Image (cartoon, helix red, strand yellow):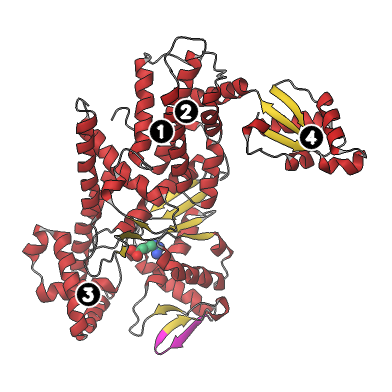
Amino acid sequence: MDAKQQVVQALAQALPDVDAHDIETKIERPKDSQNGDFAFPTFFLAKTQHKAPQMIAADLIEAIDQNGFEKVVVAGPYVNFFLDKGQIAAEILQAILADPENYGNSDLGNAGNVPIDMSSPNIAKPMSMGHLRSTVIGNSLAKILTKVNYNPIKINHLGDWGTQFGKLMAAYKMWGSEEEVKADPINTLQKYYVRFHQEDKENPELDDDARAWFKKLEDGDEEATHLWKWFRSESLKLFMKIYDLLGIDFDSYNGEAFYNDKMDEVVQMLEDKGLLQESKGAEIVDLEKYNLNPALIKKTDGATLYITRDLAAAIYRKRTYDFVQSLYVVGNEQQNHFKQLKAVLKELGFDWADDIHHIPFGLITQGGRKLSTREGRVILLENVLNDAISLARKQIAEKNPDLKNAEEVAQQVGVGAVVFHDLKNERLNNFDFDLEEVVRFEGETGPYVQYAHARSQSILRKAGNPDLTTANLALGDPAAWEIIKSLGQFGEIIQRAAREYEPSVIAKYALQLAKEFNQYYAHTKILVEDDEKMARLALVEAVSDVLKSALELLGVQAPDEM
Ligand code: ARG
Protein backbone atom coordinates (compact mmCIF):
# COMPACT_ATOMS: atom_id res chain seq x y z
CA MET A 1 0.00 0.00 0.00
CA ASP A 2 1.01 3.54 -0.69
CA ALA A 3 2.49 5.13 2.45
CA LYS A 4 0.04 8.03 2.53
CA GLN A 5 -2.93 5.68 2.28
CA GLN A 6 -1.57 3.81 5.26
CA VAL A 7 -1.72 7.04 7.28
CA VAL A 8 -5.20 7.85 5.97
CA GLN A 9 -6.43 4.40 6.96
CA ALA A 10 -4.99 4.59 10.47
CA LEU A 11 -6.61 7.99 11.00
CA ALA A 12 -9.93 6.97 9.47
CA GLN A 13 -10.18 4.04 11.88
CA ALA A 14 -9.55 6.33 14.82
CA LEU A 15 -11.95 8.99 13.52
CA PRO A 16 -15.04 7.07 12.32
CA ASP A 17 -17.18 10.24 12.14
CA VAL A 18 -14.83 12.12 9.83
CA ASP A 19 -14.85 11.69 6.07
CA ALA A 20 -11.75 9.82 4.87
CA HIS A 21 -11.38 12.20 1.97
CA ASP A 22 -11.29 15.19 4.37
CA ILE A 23 -8.60 13.42 6.34
CA GLU A 24 -6.56 12.84 3.23
CA THR A 25 -6.65 16.46 2.11
CA LYS A 26 -5.46 17.66 5.54
CA ILE A 27 -2.38 15.43 5.71
CA GLU A 28 0.90 17.31 5.30
CA ARG A 29 4.44 16.27 4.50
CA PRO A 30 6.73 18.00 7.04
CA LYS A 31 9.72 19.74 5.49
CA ASP A 32 11.97 18.59 8.31
CA SER A 33 12.04 14.80 8.66
CA GLN A 34 12.48 15.35 12.44
CA ASN A 35 8.74 15.96 12.42
CA GLY A 36 7.98 12.65 10.79
CA ASP A 37 7.10 11.60 7.26
CA PHE A 38 3.49 12.75 7.52
CA ALA A 39 1.74 15.18 9.88
CA PHE A 40 -1.95 15.48 10.66
CA PRO A 41 -3.19 18.88 11.97
CA THR A 42 -6.24 18.66 14.22
CA PHE A 43 -7.45 22.28 14.11
CA PHE A 44 -10.32 21.56 11.74
CA LEU A 45 -11.84 19.13 14.26
CA ALA A 46 -11.94 21.61 17.17
CA LYS A 47 -15.39 22.97 16.31
CA THR A 48 -17.20 19.65 15.96
CA GLN A 49 -15.42 17.98 18.87
CA HIS A 50 -15.63 21.02 21.19
CA LYS A 51 -12.06 20.44 22.33
CA ALA A 52 -8.73 22.22 22.00
CA PRO A 53 -6.62 20.84 19.11
CA GLN A 54 -3.88 19.80 21.57
CA MET A 55 -6.44 17.68 23.43
CA ILE A 56 -7.75 16.16 20.24
CA ALA A 57 -4.21 15.16 19.18
CA ALA A 58 -3.50 13.66 22.61
CA ASP A 59 -6.72 11.60 22.52
CA LEU A 60 -6.25 10.62 18.93
CA ILE A 61 -2.92 9.01 19.53
CA GLU A 62 -4.49 6.63 22.05
CA ALA A 63 -7.01 5.53 19.42
CA ILE A 64 -4.61 5.04 16.52
CA ASP A 65 -3.39 1.56 15.68
CA GLN A 66 0.37 2.12 15.49
CA ASN A 67 1.09 -1.16 13.79
CA GLY A 68 3.12 -0.68 10.63
CA PHE A 69 4.64 2.60 11.80
CA GLU A 70 7.97 3.18 13.42
CA LYS A 71 6.18 5.54 15.80
CA VAL A 72 3.29 7.97 16.03
CA VAL A 73 3.76 11.00 18.31
CA VAL A 74 1.92 14.12 19.43
CA ALA A 75 3.51 17.50 18.70
CA GLY A 76 1.13 20.15 20.09
CA PRO A 77 -1.93 20.18 17.83
CA TYR A 78 -0.31 17.77 15.35
CA VAL A 79 -0.06 14.01 15.18
CA ASN A 80 3.21 13.07 13.48
CA PHE A 81 3.67 9.75 11.72
CA PHE A 82 7.06 8.10 11.30
CA LEU A 83 6.96 5.35 8.72
CA ASP A 84 8.45 1.96 9.36
CA LYS A 85 11.38 2.51 7.04
CA GLY A 86 12.48 -1.08 6.92
CA GLN A 87 9.07 -2.27 5.82
CA ILE A 88 8.71 0.42 3.17
CA ALA A 89 12.21 -0.24 1.88
CA ALA A 90 11.37 -3.91 1.56
CA GLU A 91 8.16 -3.20 -0.36
CA ILE A 92 9.81 -0.82 -2.84
CA LEU A 93 12.93 -2.91 -3.41
CA GLN A 94 10.83 -6.02 -3.83
CA ALA A 95 8.64 -4.33 -6.45
CA ILE A 96 11.66 -3.15 -8.47
CA LEU A 97 13.64 -6.39 -8.32
CA ALA A 98 10.64 -8.53 -9.19
CA ASP A 99 9.98 -6.73 -12.49
CA PRO A 100 12.48 -3.97 -13.22
CA GLU A 101 11.28 -3.27 -16.75
CA ASN A 102 7.70 -2.58 -15.74
CA TYR A 103 8.42 -0.76 -12.49
CA GLY A 104 6.80 2.68 -12.56
CA ASN A 105 4.18 1.72 -15.18
CA SER A 106 0.65 3.01 -14.84
CA ASP A 107 -2.49 3.39 -16.91
CA LEU A 108 -3.30 6.98 -17.73
CA GLY A 109 -3.77 6.30 -21.41
CA ASN A 110 -6.07 3.32 -21.69
CA ALA A 111 -4.08 2.22 -24.77
CA GLY A 112 -5.25 5.27 -26.74
CA ASN A 113 -3.42 6.19 -29.96
CA VAL A 114 -1.21 9.28 -29.94
CA PRO A 115 0.47 10.27 -33.21
CA ILE A 116 3.62 12.27 -32.50
CA ASP A 117 4.79 14.51 -35.32
CA MET A 118 8.54 14.73 -34.68
CA SER A 119 11.92 15.43 -36.26
CA SER A 120 10.44 16.40 -39.66
CA PRO A 121 13.59 17.88 -41.24
CA ASN A 122 13.54 19.52 -44.64
CA ILE A 123 14.82 17.70 -47.68
CA ALA A 124 17.89 19.18 -49.35
CA LYS A 125 18.87 21.00 -46.21
CA PRO A 126 21.08 19.73 -43.44
CA MET A 127 19.33 18.49 -40.33
CA SER A 128 19.82 21.27 -37.80
CA MET A 129 20.12 21.36 -34.04
CA GLY A 130 16.48 22.42 -33.94
CA HIS A 131 15.51 19.17 -35.63
CA LEU A 132 17.66 17.35 -33.11
CA ARG A 133 15.52 18.83 -30.36
CA SER A 134 12.32 17.73 -32.03
CA THR A 135 13.73 14.26 -32.65
CA VAL A 136 14.95 13.56 -29.13
CA ILE A 137 12.02 15.23 -27.35
CA GLY A 138 9.55 13.35 -29.54
CA ASN A 139 11.35 10.06 -29.06
CA SER A 140 11.43 10.51 -25.28
CA LEU A 141 7.75 11.49 -25.14
CA ALA A 142 6.90 8.34 -27.09
CA LYS A 143 8.71 6.23 -24.49
CA ILE A 144 7.18 8.11 -21.54
CA LEU A 145 3.68 7.82 -22.98
CA THR A 146 4.20 4.09 -23.51
CA LYS A 147 4.99 3.71 -19.77
CA VAL A 148 1.62 5.23 -18.88
CA ASN A 149 -0.18 3.06 -21.43
CA TYR A 150 -0.71 5.25 -24.45
CA ASN A 151 0.12 3.93 -27.90
CA PRO A 152 2.38 6.50 -29.58
CA ILE A 153 2.86 6.58 -33.37
CA LYS A 154 6.07 8.34 -34.39
CA ILE A 155 5.57 10.30 -37.59
CA ASN A 156 8.37 12.00 -39.52
CA HIS A 157 6.50 14.73 -41.40
CA LEU A 158 9.38 15.31 -43.82
CA GLY A 159 9.59 18.75 -45.38
CA ASP A 160 9.65 17.26 -48.85
CA TRP A 161 7.39 19.78 -50.53
CA GLY A 162 7.17 23.54 -50.78
CA THR A 163 8.63 26.60 -52.40
CA GLN A 164 12.14 25.78 -51.20
CA PHE A 165 12.24 23.08 -53.88
CA GLY A 166 11.59 25.74 -56.46
CA LYS A 167 14.59 27.65 -55.15
CA LEU A 168 16.77 24.59 -55.15
CA MET A 169 15.80 23.63 -58.69
CA ALA A 170 16.31 27.15 -59.96
CA ALA A 171 19.73 27.20 -58.29
CA TYR A 172 20.64 23.78 -59.64
CA LYS A 173 19.67 24.73 -63.17
CA MET A 174 21.78 27.89 -62.98
CA TRP A 175 24.93 26.71 -61.27
CA GLY A 176 24.59 23.01 -60.60
CA SER A 177 26.37 20.01 -61.97
CA GLU A 178 25.24 16.43 -61.62
CA GLU A 179 28.75 15.17 -60.84
CA GLU A 180 29.21 17.72 -58.09
CA VAL A 181 25.92 16.75 -56.42
CA LYS A 182 26.68 13.04 -56.71
CA ALA A 183 30.07 13.45 -55.10
CA ASP A 184 28.76 15.21 -51.99
CA PRO A 185 24.97 15.60 -52.14
CA ILE A 186 23.89 17.50 -49.07
CA ASN A 187 26.82 19.88 -48.88
CA THR A 188 26.50 20.67 -52.54
CA LEU A 189 22.74 21.20 -52.42
CA GLN A 190 23.23 23.29 -49.31
CA LYS A 191 25.83 25.35 -51.16
CA TYR A 192 23.41 26.01 -54.03
CA TYR A 193 20.71 26.97 -51.56
CA VAL A 194 22.94 29.37 -49.65
CA ARG A 195 24.13 30.92 -52.92
CA PHE A 196 20.54 31.34 -54.07
CA HIS A 197 19.73 33.26 -50.92
CA GLN A 198 22.79 35.45 -51.26
CA GLU A 199 22.13 36.28 -54.88
CA ASP A 200 18.40 36.85 -54.64
CA LYS A 201 19.07 39.75 -52.29
CA GLU A 202 20.63 41.58 -55.25
CA ASN A 203 18.55 39.97 -57.92
CA PRO A 204 14.88 39.51 -56.96
CA GLU A 205 13.93 37.95 -60.34
CA LEU A 206 15.49 34.76 -59.02
CA ASP A 207 12.44 34.40 -56.79
CA ASP A 208 10.13 34.38 -59.83
CA ASP A 209 12.24 31.66 -61.35
CA ALA A 210 11.97 29.64 -58.13
CA ARG A 211 8.21 30.09 -58.01
CA ALA A 212 7.92 28.89 -61.58
CA TRP A 213 9.89 25.74 -60.77
CA PHE A 214 7.75 24.94 -57.78
CA LYS A 215 4.62 25.40 -59.88
CA LYS A 216 6.07 22.93 -62.41
CA LEU A 217 6.65 20.48 -59.61
CA GLU A 218 3.08 20.82 -58.36
CA ASP A 219 1.82 20.30 -61.92
CA GLY A 220 3.77 17.06 -62.23
CA ASP A 221 6.35 18.26 -64.76
CA GLU A 222 8.73 15.41 -65.58
CA GLU A 223 12.06 17.14 -65.10
CA ALA A 224 10.95 18.81 -61.88
CA THR A 225 9.64 15.52 -60.50
CA HIS A 226 12.84 13.73 -61.40
CA LEU A 227 14.99 16.33 -59.63
CA TRP A 228 12.68 16.27 -56.61
CA LYS A 229 12.94 12.49 -56.26
CA TRP A 230 16.69 12.62 -56.59
CA PHE A 231 17.15 15.37 -53.96
CA ARG A 232 14.76 13.57 -51.62
CA SER A 233 16.47 10.19 -51.73
CA GLU A 234 19.94 11.69 -51.27
CA SER A 235 18.75 13.66 -48.24
CA LEU A 236 16.97 10.73 -46.67
CA LYS A 237 20.14 8.64 -46.81
CA LEU A 238 21.92 11.20 -44.69
CA PHE A 239 19.04 11.61 -42.23
CA MET A 240 18.98 7.84 -41.76
CA LYS A 241 22.63 7.87 -40.73
CA ILE A 242 21.80 10.32 -37.97
CA TYR A 243 18.72 8.41 -36.82
CA ASP A 244 20.84 5.25 -36.66
CA LEU A 245 23.41 7.04 -34.56
CA LEU A 246 20.66 8.20 -32.19
CA GLY A 247 18.99 4.76 -32.18
CA ILE A 248 15.67 6.30 -33.23
CA ASP A 249 13.16 4.97 -35.73
CA PHE A 250 9.76 6.07 -36.99
CA ASP A 251 6.43 4.42 -37.66
CA SER A 252 5.78 6.64 -40.67
CA TYR A 253 7.78 8.81 -43.07
CA ASN A 254 4.70 10.37 -44.66
CA GLY A 255 6.02 13.84 -45.37
CA GLU A 256 4.32 16.87 -46.85
CA ALA A 257 4.30 15.43 -50.37
CA PHE A 258 2.19 12.52 -49.15
CA TYR A 259 -0.74 14.91 -48.83
CA ASN A 260 -0.61 16.27 -52.38
CA ASP A 261 -3.65 14.27 -53.46
CA LYS A 262 -5.47 14.90 -50.18
CA MET A 263 -5.67 18.68 -50.29
CA ASP A 264 -8.46 19.09 -52.83
CA GLU A 265 -10.83 17.51 -50.34
CA VAL A 266 -9.78 19.98 -47.66
CA VAL A 267 -10.24 22.94 -49.96
CA GLN A 268 -13.64 21.56 -50.93
CA MET A 269 -14.68 21.22 -47.28
CA LEU A 270 -13.64 24.80 -46.62
CA GLU A 271 -15.61 25.92 -49.62
CA ASP A 272 -18.72 23.95 -48.64
CA LYS A 273 -18.67 25.54 -45.22
CA GLY A 274 -18.31 28.96 -46.82
CA LEU A 275 -15.03 29.54 -45.05
CA LEU A 276 -12.86 30.40 -48.05
CA GLN A 277 -12.48 34.06 -48.94
CA GLU A 278 -10.63 35.71 -51.73
CA SER A 279 -8.00 38.20 -50.81
CA LYS A 280 -5.85 39.77 -53.53
CA GLY A 281 -6.29 36.69 -55.68
CA ALA A 282 -5.32 34.28 -52.90
CA GLU A 283 -7.68 32.05 -50.91
CA ILE A 284 -7.75 32.58 -47.17
CA VAL A 285 -9.71 31.61 -44.07
CA ASP A 286 -10.47 34.56 -41.83
CA LEU A 287 -9.57 33.87 -38.20
CA GLU A 288 -10.28 37.24 -36.68
CA LYS A 289 -12.60 35.81 -34.04
CA TYR A 290 -9.64 33.76 -32.78
CA ASN A 291 -7.49 36.87 -32.77
CA LEU A 292 -5.27 35.30 -35.41
CA ASN A 293 -4.05 36.33 -38.84
CA PRO A 294 -5.93 34.77 -41.73
CA ALA A 295 -4.76 31.29 -42.79
CA LEU A 296 -3.43 31.40 -46.35
CA ILE A 297 -4.74 28.25 -48.06
CA LYS A 298 -3.89 28.88 -51.72
CA LYS A 299 -1.59 31.40 -53.28
CA THR A 300 -2.49 33.61 -56.24
CA ASP A 301 -0.96 31.07 -58.65
CA GLY A 302 -2.95 28.24 -57.06
CA ALA A 303 0.04 26.77 -55.18
CA THR A 304 -0.84 25.20 -51.84
CA LEU A 305 0.89 26.02 -48.61
CA TYR A 306 2.42 24.47 -45.51
CA ILE A 307 -0.83 24.88 -43.57
CA THR A 308 -2.93 23.35 -46.37
CA ARG A 309 -0.79 20.23 -46.16
CA ASP A 310 -1.03 20.23 -42.37
CA LEU A 311 -4.83 20.42 -42.52
CA ALA A 312 -4.88 17.39 -44.81
CA ALA A 313 -2.40 15.61 -42.51
CA ALA A 314 -4.43 16.31 -39.35
CA ILE A 315 -7.60 14.92 -40.93
CA TYR A 316 -5.73 11.93 -42.33
CA ARG A 317 -4.32 11.14 -38.87
CA LYS A 318 -7.72 11.35 -37.20
CA ARG A 319 -9.17 8.95 -39.78
CA THR A 320 -6.22 6.57 -39.74
CA TYR A 321 -5.47 6.42 -36.01
CA ASP A 322 -8.64 7.70 -34.35
CA PHE A 323 -6.29 9.41 -31.91
CA VAL A 324 -7.05 10.49 -28.34
CA GLN A 325 -4.36 13.16 -28.64
CA SER A 326 -2.27 14.32 -31.58
CA LEU A 327 1.10 15.90 -30.78
CA TYR A 328 3.39 18.13 -32.83
CA VAL A 329 6.90 18.52 -31.45
CA VAL A 330 7.93 21.65 -33.30
CA GLY A 331 9.88 24.78 -32.34
CA ASN A 332 8.21 27.60 -30.48
CA GLU A 333 8.55 29.89 -33.49
CA GLN A 334 5.74 27.95 -35.18
CA GLN A 335 3.25 28.66 -32.42
CA ASN A 336 1.06 30.77 -34.65
CA HIS A 337 0.95 28.14 -37.34
CA PHE A 338 -0.45 25.56 -34.95
CA LYS A 339 -2.95 28.00 -33.48
CA GLN A 340 -4.18 28.66 -37.00
CA LEU A 341 -4.27 24.95 -37.78
CA LYS A 342 -6.45 24.24 -34.76
CA ALA A 343 -8.67 27.22 -35.43
CA VAL A 344 -9.36 26.20 -39.04
CA LEU A 345 -10.16 22.63 -37.93
CA LYS A 346 -12.53 24.05 -35.33
CA GLU A 347 -14.21 26.15 -38.00
CA LEU A 348 -14.63 22.99 -40.05
CA GLY A 349 -16.60 21.60 -37.11
CA PHE A 350 -14.05 19.06 -35.89
CA ASP A 351 -14.31 18.85 -32.09
CA TRP A 352 -11.17 16.78 -32.00
CA ALA A 353 -9.21 19.94 -32.83
CA ASP A 354 -9.02 20.28 -29.01
CA ASP A 355 -7.00 17.05 -28.85
CA ILE A 356 -4.25 18.56 -31.00
CA HIS A 357 -1.34 19.82 -28.95
CA HIS A 358 1.62 21.76 -30.22
CA ILE A 359 4.59 20.78 -28.02
CA PRO A 360 6.91 23.75 -28.55
CA PHE A 361 10.54 24.01 -27.56
CA GLY A 362 13.18 26.74 -27.33
CA LEU A 363 16.26 27.44 -29.40
CA ILE A 364 19.76 26.09 -29.15
CA THR A 365 22.20 28.98 -29.20
CA GLN A 366 25.95 29.08 -29.46
CA GLY A 367 27.78 31.78 -27.59
CA GLY A 368 24.32 33.29 -27.07
CA ARG A 369 23.68 33.54 -30.83
CA LYS A 370 20.82 31.96 -32.67
CA LEU A 371 21.75 29.41 -35.33
CA SER A 372 20.35 29.83 -38.81
CA THR A 373 20.43 27.47 -41.79
CA ARG A 374 19.88 30.18 -44.32
CA GLU A 375 23.17 31.94 -43.86
CA GLY A 376 24.94 28.65 -43.54
CA ARG A 377 25.73 29.46 -39.92
CA VAL A 378 24.66 26.12 -38.60
CA ILE A 379 26.18 23.41 -36.50
CA LEU A 380 25.74 20.24 -38.42
CA LEU A 381 24.16 17.64 -36.26
CA GLU A 382 26.25 14.79 -37.56
CA ASN A 383 29.45 16.70 -36.77
CA VAL A 384 28.23 17.45 -33.26
CA LEU A 385 27.48 13.80 -32.59
CA ASN A 386 30.81 12.68 -34.02
CA ASP A 387 32.71 15.30 -32.01
CA ALA A 388 30.90 14.19 -28.87
CA ILE A 389 31.87 10.59 -29.55
CA SER A 390 35.54 11.58 -30.01
CA LEU A 391 35.54 13.47 -26.73
CA ALA A 392 33.94 10.53 -24.94
CA ARG A 393 36.53 8.20 -26.51
CA LYS A 394 39.32 10.38 -25.12
CA GLN A 395 37.82 10.44 -21.61
CA ILE A 396 37.30 6.70 -21.57
CA ALA A 397 40.88 6.09 -22.71
CA GLU A 398 42.06 8.10 -19.69
CA LYS A 399 39.69 6.68 -17.10
CA ASN A 400 39.38 3.08 -18.17
CA PRO A 401 42.15 2.18 -20.65
CA ASP A 402 41.40 -1.56 -20.45
CA LEU A 403 37.71 -1.30 -21.33
CA LYS A 404 36.96 -4.03 -23.86
CA ASN A 405 34.14 -2.59 -25.98
CA ALA A 406 35.53 0.94 -25.69
CA GLU A 407 34.33 2.04 -29.12
CA GLU A 408 30.74 0.99 -28.50
CA VAL A 409 30.75 2.68 -25.09
CA ALA A 410 32.27 5.87 -26.55
CA GLN A 411 29.34 6.01 -28.93
CA GLN A 412 26.79 5.42 -26.15
CA VAL A 413 28.40 8.06 -23.96
CA GLY A 414 28.99 10.66 -26.68
CA VAL A 415 25.52 10.42 -28.20
CA GLY A 416 23.92 10.00 -24.78
CA ALA A 417 25.62 13.18 -23.59
CA VAL A 418 24.20 15.28 -26.42
CA VAL A 419 20.72 13.81 -25.98
CA PHE A 420 20.74 14.18 -22.19
CA HIS A 421 21.95 17.78 -22.39
CA ASP A 422 19.02 18.60 -24.60
CA LEU A 423 16.43 16.85 -22.46
CA LYS A 424 17.53 18.06 -19.03
CA ASN A 425 16.49 21.59 -20.02
CA GLU A 426 12.83 22.42 -19.70
CA ARG A 427 11.67 22.19 -23.23
CA LEU A 428 10.68 25.83 -23.66
CA ASN A 429 13.97 27.25 -22.43
CA ASN A 430 16.64 28.32 -24.88
CA PHE A 431 20.02 26.87 -24.06
CA ASP A 432 23.59 27.24 -25.11
CA PHE A 433 25.56 24.41 -26.59
CA ASP A 434 29.14 23.90 -25.47
CA LEU A 435 30.43 20.48 -26.39
CA GLU A 436 33.12 20.22 -23.68
CA GLU A 437 30.49 20.96 -21.05
CA VAL A 438 28.05 18.45 -22.49
CA VAL A 439 30.41 15.48 -22.39
CA ARG A 440 31.84 16.02 -18.90
CA PHE A 441 31.69 13.08 -16.49
CA GLU A 442 30.84 15.38 -13.56
CA GLY A 443 28.12 17.93 -13.08
CA GLU A 444 24.62 17.69 -14.45
CA THR A 445 25.43 15.60 -17.49
CA GLY A 446 24.36 12.37 -19.13
CA PRO A 447 27.77 10.75 -18.58
CA TYR A 448 27.42 11.51 -14.85
CA VAL A 449 24.21 9.46 -14.68
CA GLN A 450 25.63 6.74 -16.93
CA TYR A 451 28.68 6.62 -14.68
CA ALA A 452 26.55 6.15 -11.54
CA HIS A 453 24.79 3.29 -13.30
CA ALA A 454 28.10 1.70 -14.36
CA ARG A 455 29.38 2.05 -10.80
CA SER A 456 26.32 0.26 -9.41
CA GLN A 457 26.91 -2.54 -11.90
CA SER A 458 30.54 -2.80 -10.87
CA ILE A 459 29.53 -3.16 -7.20
CA LEU A 460 27.16 -5.97 -8.10
CA ARG A 461 29.88 -7.69 -10.13
CA LYS A 462 32.28 -7.40 -7.21
CA ALA A 463 29.67 -9.02 -4.96
CA GLY A 464 29.38 -11.89 -7.45
CA ASN A 465 25.92 -10.88 -8.74
CA PRO A 466 24.06 -12.70 -5.95
CA ASP A 467 20.37 -13.63 -6.24
CA LEU A 468 18.66 -11.00 -4.11
CA THR A 469 15.01 -11.89 -4.64
CA THR A 470 14.86 -14.10 -1.56
CA ALA A 471 16.92 -11.83 0.71
CA ASN A 472 15.48 -9.90 3.65
CA LEU A 473 15.08 -6.45 2.08
CA ALA A 474 14.03 -4.53 5.22
CA LEU A 475 16.86 -2.02 4.92
CA GLY A 476 16.69 0.16 8.04
CA ASP A 477 19.87 2.17 7.44
CA PRO A 478 18.85 5.87 7.65
CA ALA A 479 21.57 6.74 5.12
CA ALA A 480 19.59 4.83 2.49
CA TRP A 481 16.25 6.51 3.23
CA GLU A 482 16.48 9.36 0.71
CA ILE A 483 17.27 6.87 -2.04
CA ILE A 484 14.37 4.63 -1.04
CA LYS A 485 12.00 7.58 -1.12
CA SER A 486 13.27 8.61 -4.57
CA LEU A 487 12.89 5.07 -5.88
CA GLY A 488 9.33 5.01 -4.58
CA GLN A 489 8.50 8.18 -6.53
CA PHE A 490 9.47 6.89 -9.98
CA GLY A 491 5.89 6.15 -11.07
CA GLU A 492 4.63 9.61 -10.02
CA ILE A 493 7.56 11.23 -11.81
CA ILE A 494 6.77 9.42 -15.07
CA GLN A 495 3.12 10.46 -14.81
CA ARG A 496 4.11 14.07 -14.30
CA ALA A 497 6.46 13.96 -17.29
CA ALA A 498 3.62 12.49 -19.37
CA ARG A 499 1.04 15.05 -18.27
CA GLU A 500 3.38 17.98 -18.87
CA TYR A 501 4.99 16.51 -22.01
CA GLU A 502 8.24 17.26 -20.25
CA PRO A 503 11.18 14.81 -20.48
CA SER A 504 13.25 17.16 -18.29
CA VAL A 505 11.25 15.87 -15.32
CA ILE A 506 12.80 12.44 -15.92
CA ALA A 507 16.29 13.85 -16.58
CA LYS A 508 16.23 15.85 -13.33
CA TYR A 509 15.01 12.82 -11.44
CA ALA A 510 17.83 10.70 -12.87
CA LEU A 511 20.40 13.33 -11.87
CA GLN A 512 19.02 13.46 -8.33
CA LEU A 513 18.95 9.70 -7.92
CA ALA A 514 22.51 9.42 -9.28
CA LYS A 515 23.65 12.11 -6.85
CA GLU A 516 21.95 10.47 -3.87
CA PHE A 517 23.50 7.17 -4.82
CA ASN A 518 27.00 8.67 -5.14
CA GLN A 519 26.65 10.26 -1.70
CA TYR A 520 25.49 6.99 -0.19
CA TYR A 521 28.33 5.12 -1.86
CA ALA A 522 30.88 7.64 -0.53
CA HIS A 523 29.78 7.12 3.09
CA THR A 524 28.62 3.52 3.29
CA LYS A 525 30.63 0.32 3.05
CA ILE A 526 28.25 -1.66 0.94
CA LEU A 527 30.12 -4.94 0.82
CA VAL A 528 30.93 -5.21 4.54
CA GLU A 529 29.62 -8.52 5.99
CA ASP A 530 26.68 -7.78 8.30
CA ASP A 531 22.92 -8.40 8.53
CA GLU A 532 22.01 -5.76 6.00
CA LYS A 533 24.56 -6.59 3.30
CA MET A 534 22.03 -8.31 1.04
CA ALA A 535 19.51 -5.51 1.54
CA ARG A 536 22.18 -2.95 0.64
CA LEU A 537 23.03 -4.88 -2.51
CA ALA A 538 19.34 -4.99 -3.35
CA LEU A 539 19.32 -1.22 -3.00
CA VAL A 540 22.26 -0.99 -5.39
CA GLU A 541 20.51 -3.22 -7.88
CA ALA A 542 17.27 -1.24 -7.59
CA VAL A 543 19.13 2.03 -8.18
CA SER A 544 20.84 0.45 -11.15
CA ASP A 545 17.52 -0.72 -12.62
CA VAL A 546 15.76 2.59 -12.12
CA LEU A 547 18.67 4.68 -13.48
CA LYS A 548 18.75 2.47 -16.55
CA SER A 549 15.00 2.77 -16.94
CA ALA A 550 15.10 6.56 -16.57
CA LEU A 551 17.90 6.87 -19.15
CA GLU A 552 15.98 4.54 -21.44
CA LEU A 553 12.97 6.89 -21.20
CA LEU A 554 15.21 9.66 -22.47
CA GLY A 555 16.56 7.52 -25.30
CA VAL A 556 20.00 7.29 -23.65
CA GLN A 557 21.80 3.98 -23.25
CA ALA A 558 23.29 2.75 -19.98
CA PRO A 559 26.54 0.82 -20.50
CA ASP A 560 27.48 -1.60 -17.71
CA GLU A 561 31.06 -0.41 -17.76
CA MET A 562 32.64 2.84 -18.87
N1 ARG B 1 9.66 20.75 -41.71
C1 ARG B 1 9.26 21.73 -40.75
C2 ARG B 1 10.46 22.58 -40.33
O1 ARG B 1 11.58 22.12 -40.38
C3 ARG B 1 8.66 21.12 -39.52
C4 ARG B 1 7.41 20.33 -39.73
C5 ARG B 1 6.65 20.12 -38.47
N2 ARG B 1 5.48 19.34 -38.61
C6 ARG B 1 4.31 19.76 -39.12
N3 ARG B 1 3.33 18.90 -39.22
N4 ARG B 1 4.13 21.01 -39.48
O2 ARG B 1 10.27 23.71 -39.93
Residues 561 and 253: in front is 561
According to the picture, the residue beneath numbered tag 1 turns out to be 548
Quarter containing the C terminus: top left
Which of the 4 image quadrants contains residue 53? Answer: top right
> Farthest bottom residue?
280
Q: Earlier in the sequence, mark 3 or mark 1?
A: 3
Residue 424 locus on image (x, y percent): 41, 47
Residue at (34, 46) in percent of width and height? 419
Q: Earlier in the sequence, mark 3 or mark 2?
A: 2
Report, in whole angstroms, how far the alpha carbon at label 4 lies from the one at label 1.
44 Å
Q: Amino acid at mark 3?
A: Lys
Residue at (6, 63) in percent of width and height? 179
Eye-nearest disc, 4 or 1: 4
Q: Is residue 279 magenta?
A: yes
According to the picture, the residue beneath numbered tag 3 turns out to be 167
Residues 376 and 212: in front is 376
Eye-nearest disc, 3 or 1: 1
Residue 487 locus on image (x, y percent): 52, 31
**Badge 3, how many Cα within 10 Å: few under 14, some, many 20+?**
many
According to the picture, the residue beneath numbered tag 4 turns out to be 76
Cβ–Cβ under 8 Å for marks 1 and 2: yes
What secondary structure is the stretch in magenta mostly built from?
Answer: strand
